[in-house]
Image: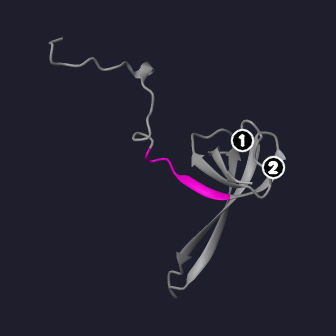
Amino acid sequence: MSENQEAVPAKKDFVPSEATRKNQKVRVGIVKSTGMEKTIVVEYTNRVPHPKFKKIVKQSKKFYAHDEKGEAAVGDKVRIEETTPISKLKRWKLVEILSH
């Protein structure tokens, strides 16, 4: 290895930064249920124009998110992030609680 080349860390030492994780989706929604252990149900509401009539309509979708510490409560506004599948329905994890 010459003096001008920098050592590249091995793959196992690689820690993803915010720049490499830019393709992960992030959503903000309201917690609707906390009945399961370490799982919350988050309702995400999106406002989009109707394809034909162009009027703004609301679309809502439920996401099952992993809440490791069980800190979210019903009615909380939370930020969730897409992750690798955790179970049959869980593909999201809780990032932070925005308001109680």
- Is residue 1 highlighted in magenta? no
Q: Is residue 89 visible?
A: no
Q: What amino acid does circle 1 point to? A: Asp
Q: What amino acid does circle 2 point to? A: Thr
Is the residue 62 above or below the residue 13 in the image? below
Horizontal side, residue 14 vs residue 82: left or right: left
Instruction: Please state the horizontal and vertical placement of residue 28, each as a whole percent of the image.
Output: 61, 57
Tell me the element at label 2: strand
Colour treatment of the image: one colour
Residue bounds of the magenta highlight: 22-29
Instruction: Please state the horizontal and vertical placement of residue 21, each as a whole percent of the image.
Output: 45, 41
Instruction: Please state the horizontal and vertical placement of residue 18, each as a whole percent of the image.
Output: 44, 40
- Please tell me how crowded label 1 is: few (under 14), some (14-19), or many (20+) other residues with Cα within 10 Å: many
Single out the residue that lies furthest toward the right. 35
For disc 2, the marked residue is 34
Is the residue 73 above or below the residue 12 in the image? below
Residue under the image location 68 percent in, 47 percent down: 65
Q: Are marks 1 and 2 in contact (CB under 8 Å)?
A: yes
- 51, 56: nearer the viewer: 56
**Residue 67 circle label:** 1
Instruction: Please state the horizontal and vertical placement of residue 64, each as a whole percent of the image.
Output: 70, 50
- Quadrant where the N terminus is found in the figure: top left
Single out the residue that lies furthest toward the front. 99
User: Residue 90 sits in which quadrant?
Assistant: top right
